[in-house]
Image: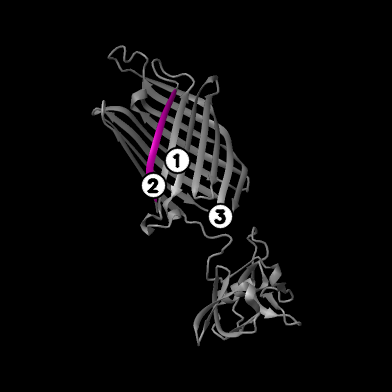
Amino acid sequence: MTKPLLLACALAAAGLLAADTIRTTSGDVLNGTITGIKGGKVVIDTAFAGPLAIDQADIASMDYASETPMFARTDASSRDKDEVRVSRDAEGNPVLIPTADKTRALALEEVATLWDPAEDDPDFPPVKLWAFSASLGLTGTSGSSRDVSTSIYLDAVRTSEKTTFKAYASMYKTRSDGVASAERYIGGLDFEHRPYEYASWYLRDEAQHNRFNDYKLRNVAGAGYGLYLWNTVTDGRASLLRFRVGLAHTYNNRYSKKWPATTVRDTVHDSDVALDLGLLFHYDFVCGVQWNTELTYTPILDDFDNGTLVHESKLSYLMKDLGVVPALNDVSLEAGVRNEYQTRPQPGLCHTETTWYLRLKKTW
């Protein structure tokens, strides 16, 4: 960051009320109050012409008259910061003096970030504790048959510096010629604590009712260790790859294999200990599209060939990137697919069930 730019940020953060002076490379002298910087221009509010925007490249020098304290950081990737005041050294060069150690002097070239203590930290902005979203998808066909499909997804996410808690619920339902042909309900909880940058531990639980798989209840509860293979943010775009491994308890309450051959619907209870393996991938594209993929595999420990693999991938596009209708800024368009693969499905059922969806999502 250039020296004039850093000084302009300092002046803007300090909110100078006294007269500031900008001298341009062409020899012009502007007196007023520097109010901010935007798009590579320093804005000074003058008495004779109102606000004027001056290109940084055209600024030869600036003088200021404020000692209002600010926060300064020399490394934008570190949370360490100093409270400083704008001053000058013996040669008249602008410097920043930490209030905790007045023997130090930071040259503007050393400072990565300056901001007003009354404002949010620009490098580490506060995280909104709770975020909620609701999605609705509705599709239909007509002709030889009439199909109507509905999908609903709700979630609530609480995030702090080291923990993330998520509660979610979804419903997928299809009616063909007025008769239910697919019906699935899923709900779950997911908790992650991340004491280290690349390591975490987690607890999760997911329950499912699938009418056409004859599952009255299917529940998977797991706990274990997570490892971030990478987790970066570049120009505001995040990308991460997280692997997790742990143990899980699986519980199935389903109808016996005698049905539908007979009218008897005896229920069978299965309770097993399994491995809990997972892979989560997230990537933000430059065009505003987000890609999320999650894989989960739970093989039974005492019968390793018996397991369930769940895959879900989706692309999301936030409408605010269009910049057309402000009311749609918190609405996104999602398209995704969910696959559930059973290594040993019940008699008469397929190994894989696939659900496609296209839905609108509102976040608040």
Secondary structure at numbered mark 3: loop
Report if residue 49 lies within the magenta region.
no
Residue sitting farthest toward the front: 26
Residue 337 shows in this picture: yes
Secondary structure at numbered mark 1: strand
Q: CA distance from mark 3 to mark 2?
A: 21 Å
Q: Tell which circle, 2 or 1, labels the residue nearer the N-terminal end.
A: 1
Provide residue 25's location: percent of width, then percent of height: 66, 79
Which numbered tag is attached to residue 189? 1
Q: CA distance from mark 2 to mark 1?
A: 20 Å
**Rendered-image quadrant of the C terminus:** bottom left
Q: Which residue is mark 3?
A: 236
Q: Is residue 55 left or right of residue 91?
A: left
- Three-letter amino acid code at disc 1? Leu
Residue depicted at x 36% and y 30%? 209
- Three-letter amino acid code at disc 2? Lys
Q: Which residue is mark 2?
A: 361
**Rendered-image quadrant of the N terminus:** bottom right
